[in-house]
Amino acid sequence: MVHQYLDSEALEFHSFSPSPYHFGFLTLPIYTIGNCEHLLHEAREYRVAGVKRVLIIVIALLGAYYASEYSSTSGQRAPDSQYSAAALEQAISSRRSGTQVGGSGTVTRILSDDRDGSQHQRFILRLDSGHTLLVAHNIDLAPRVADLQAGEEVSFYGVYEWNERGGVIHWTHHDPSGHHVAGWLEHGGIRYQ
Protein backbone atom coordinates (compact mmCIF):
# COMPACT_ATOMS: atom_id res chain seq x y z
CA MET A 1 0.00 0.00 0.00
CA VAL A 2 1.52 3.31 -1.07
CA HIS A 3 0.66 6.58 0.69
CA GLN A 4 1.16 10.07 -0.60
CA TYR A 5 1.61 13.25 1.36
CA LEU A 6 2.22 16.87 0.49
CA ASP A 7 5.46 18.40 1.64
CA SER A 8 4.28 21.92 2.40
CA GLU A 9 7.76 23.45 2.27
CA ALA A 10 8.79 22.00 -1.08
CA LEU A 11 5.22 21.80 -2.46
CA GLU A 12 5.93 18.38 -3.89
CA PHE A 13 4.12 15.09 -3.63
CA HIS A 14 6.14 12.22 -2.18
CA SER A 15 5.23 8.58 -2.20
CA PHE A 16 6.52 6.03 0.25
CA SER A 17 5.87 2.49 1.31
CA PRO A 18 5.00 1.85 4.93
CA SER A 19 8.16 0.95 6.80
CA PRO A 20 9.47 0.88 10.34
CA TYR A 21 10.69 4.42 9.68
CA HIS A 22 7.17 5.87 9.30
CA PHE A 23 5.49 6.57 12.61
CA GLY A 24 2.26 8.49 12.18
CA PHE A 25 3.16 12.13 11.66
CA LEU A 26 6.90 11.47 11.94
CA THR A 27 8.26 10.57 8.54
CA LEU A 28 11.92 9.95 7.92
CA PRO A 29 13.23 10.67 4.41
CA ILE A 30 12.61 7.86 1.96
CA TYR A 31 14.77 7.99 -1.14
CA THR A 32 13.61 7.23 -4.62
CA ILE A 33 15.44 4.72 -6.77
CA GLY A 34 17.30 7.56 -8.54
CA ASN A 35 18.53 9.00 -5.27
CA CYS A 36 19.59 5.52 -4.08
CA GLU A 37 21.64 4.95 -7.23
CA HIS A 38 23.33 8.31 -6.71
CA LEU A 39 24.08 7.43 -3.07
CA LEU A 40 25.42 4.00 -4.06
CA HIS A 41 27.66 5.63 -6.67
CA GLU A 42 29.00 8.09 -4.06
CA ALA A 43 29.56 5.22 -1.60
CA ARG A 44 31.51 3.27 -4.23
CA GLU A 45 33.67 6.33 -5.03
CA TYR A 46 34.32 6.88 -1.33
CA ARG A 47 35.22 3.22 -0.84
CA VAL A 48 37.58 3.24 -3.85
CA ALA A 49 39.24 6.42 -2.55
CA GLY A 50 39.63 4.76 0.87
CA VAL A 51 41.20 1.66 -0.67
CA LYS A 52 43.60 3.86 -2.64
CA ARG A 53 44.61 5.69 0.55
CA VAL A 54 45.21 2.40 2.37
CA LEU A 55 47.29 1.07 -0.54
CA ILE A 56 49.41 4.23 -0.60
CA ILE A 57 50.01 3.96 3.15
CA VAL A 58 50.89 0.25 2.90
CA ILE A 59 53.30 0.88 0.02
CA ALA A 60 54.95 3.75 1.92
CA LEU A 61 55.35 1.60 5.04
CA LEU A 62 56.81 -1.30 3.05
CA GLY A 63 59.20 1.08 1.30
CA ALA A 64 60.33 2.53 4.63
CA TYR A 65 60.78 -0.97 6.09
CA TYR A 66 62.87 -2.23 3.16
CA ALA A 67 64.90 0.99 3.07
CA SER A 68 65.74 0.63 6.76
CA GLU A 69 66.59 -3.05 6.32
CA TYR A 70 68.84 -2.28 3.35
CA SER A 71 70.63 0.57 5.09
CA SER A 72 71.15 -1.40 8.31
CA THR A 73 72.76 -4.33 6.49
CA SER A 74 74.68 -2.40 3.86
CA GLY A 75 77.06 -0.75 6.29
CA GLN A 76 76.87 2.57 4.45
CA ARG A 77 75.70 4.40 7.56
CA ALA A 78 78.22 4.89 10.33
CA PRO A 79 76.83 4.20 13.79
CA ASP A 80 76.54 6.95 16.35
CA SER A 81 80.00 6.55 17.90
CA GLN A 82 78.95 7.85 21.32
CA TYR A 83 76.09 5.33 21.50
CA SER A 84 78.29 2.47 20.22
CA ALA A 85 81.12 3.24 22.65
CA ALA A 86 78.62 3.36 25.53
CA ALA A 87 77.14 0.03 24.36
CA LEU A 88 80.66 -1.45 24.27
CA GLU A 89 81.52 -0.30 27.80
CA GLN A 90 78.18 -1.63 29.07
CA ALA A 91 78.73 -4.99 27.32
CA ILE A 92 82.23 -5.27 28.84
CA SER A 93 81.09 -4.40 32.37
CA SER A 94 78.06 -6.73 32.22
CA ARG A 95 80.00 -9.51 30.42
CA ARG A 96 77.37 -9.58 27.67
CA SER A 97 78.22 -11.24 24.36
CA GLY A 98 76.65 -10.82 20.94
CA THR A 99 76.29 -7.03 21.18
CA GLN A 100 76.75 -4.84 18.09
CA VAL A 101 79.24 -2.15 19.15
CA GLY A 102 81.62 0.44 17.79
CA GLY A 103 84.55 2.38 19.07
CA SER A 104 88.22 3.00 18.56
CA GLY A 105 91.48 2.18 20.23
CA THR A 106 95.23 2.04 19.88
CA VAL A 107 96.92 -1.05 18.49
CA THR A 108 99.17 -2.50 21.20
CA ARG A 109 100.17 -5.76 19.53
CA ILE A 110 99.95 -7.41 16.11
CA LEU A 111 99.27 -11.17 16.30
CA SER A 112 99.71 -13.86 13.66
CA ASP A 113 96.75 -14.62 11.43
CA ASP A 114 94.31 -17.27 12.60
CA ARG A 115 94.21 -19.83 9.78
CA ASP A 116 91.79 -22.33 11.34
CA GLY A 117 88.63 -22.23 9.22
CA SER A 118 88.10 -18.73 7.86
CA GLN A 119 91.30 -16.67 7.98
CA HIS A 120 91.35 -13.78 10.45
CA GLN A 121 93.79 -10.91 10.83
CA ARG A 122 94.28 -10.47 14.60
CA PHE A 123 95.54 -7.63 16.78
CA ILE A 124 95.05 -6.22 20.26
CA LEU A 125 93.45 -2.80 20.81
CA ARG A 126 93.57 -0.73 23.99
CA LEU A 127 90.49 1.46 24.48
CA ASP A 128 90.57 4.88 26.15
CA SER A 129 88.91 3.19 29.15
CA GLY A 130 91.98 0.94 29.53
CA HIS A 131 90.19 -2.26 28.45
CA THR A 132 91.93 -4.39 25.85
CA LEU A 133 90.19 -6.27 23.06
CA LEU A 134 91.25 -8.86 20.52
CA VAL A 135 90.10 -7.85 17.04
CA ALA A 136 89.53 -10.85 14.74
CA HIS A 137 88.97 -9.47 11.22
CA ASN A 138 87.80 -12.04 8.64
CA ILE A 139 90.16 -11.63 5.68
CA ASP A 140 88.32 -14.23 3.60
CA LEU A 141 85.38 -11.77 3.40
CA ALA A 142 87.08 -8.37 3.75
CA PRO A 143 90.46 -6.94 2.78
CA ARG A 144 93.32 -7.11 5.24
CA VAL A 145 94.05 -3.85 7.10
CA ALA A 146 97.18 -2.72 5.27
CA ASP A 147 100.40 -1.62 6.97
CA LEU A 148 98.99 -1.90 10.49
CA GLN A 149 101.54 -1.02 13.20
CA ALA A 150 101.52 -0.91 17.00
CA GLY A 151 100.65 2.56 18.29
CA GLU A 152 98.23 3.36 15.46
CA GLU A 153 94.56 4.19 15.91
CA VAL A 154 91.86 1.83 14.56
CA SER A 155 88.10 2.43 14.63
CA PHE A 156 85.74 -0.52 14.50
CA TYR A 157 82.12 -1.56 14.23
CA GLY A 158 81.36 -5.21 14.92
CA VAL A 159 80.07 -7.75 17.42
CA TYR A 160 81.52 -7.97 20.93
CA GLU A 161 82.01 -11.38 22.59
CA TRP A 162 83.05 -11.37 26.24
CA ASN A 163 85.95 -13.48 27.55
CA GLU A 164 88.26 -13.44 30.59
CA ARG A 165 90.90 -11.41 28.74
CA GLY A 166 88.54 -8.55 27.92
CA GLY A 167 86.70 -9.75 24.86
CA VAL A 168 86.80 -10.16 21.11
CA ILE A 169 85.47 -7.93 18.34
CA HIS A 170 84.45 -9.84 15.22
CA TRP A 171 81.95 -9.42 12.32
CA THR A 172 84.04 -6.46 11.15
CA HIS A 173 83.08 -7.18 7.54
CA HIS A 174 80.07 -7.17 5.25
CA ASP A 175 77.68 -10.12 5.26
CA PRO A 176 77.52 -11.64 1.75
CA SER A 177 74.02 -12.99 2.47
CA GLY A 178 72.82 -9.59 3.72
CA HIS A 179 71.24 -10.95 6.92
CA HIS A 180 73.67 -9.49 9.45
CA VAL A 181 74.53 -5.87 10.11
CA ALA A 182 77.70 -5.04 8.21
CA GLY A 183 80.75 -4.29 10.33
CA TRP A 184 84.03 -2.62 9.44
CA LEU A 185 87.48 -1.50 10.52
CA GLU A 186 88.88 1.93 9.73
CA HIS A 187 92.60 2.73 9.65
CA GLY A 188 94.41 5.64 8.04
CA GLY A 189 91.18 7.01 6.56
CA ILE A 190 90.39 3.73 4.77
CA ARG A 191 87.40 1.58 5.66
CA TYR A 192 87.91 -2.20 5.44
CA GLN A 193 84.66 -4.06 5.03
Image (spheres, rainbow, N blue to C red):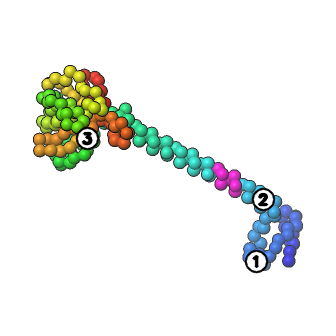
Q: Which of the pair 153/122 is nearer the observer?
A: 122
Q: How many marks?
A: 3
Work out how far the residue at label 3 is from the one at label 2, CA to CA, in angstroms: 65 Å
Instruction: Name the residue type under label 3.
Output: Val
Residue on which the image places disc 3: 159
Q: Nearer the viewer, mark 1 or mark 2?
A: 2
Residue 49 located left or right of residue 151: right
Residue on which the image places disc 1: 23
Residue 129 seen in render:
no
**Of callouts 1 and 2, which one flags the residue occurring earlier in the amino acid sequence?**
1
Residue 75 located left or right of residue 3: left
What kind of element bears circle 1?
strand
Q: Which of the pair 179/139 is nearer the observer?
A: 139
Work out how far the residue at label 1 is from the one at label 3, CA to CA, in angstroms: 76 Å
Determine which of the numbered discs, if any, sits on residue 37 in the image. 2
Instruction: Name the residue type under label 1.
Output: Phe
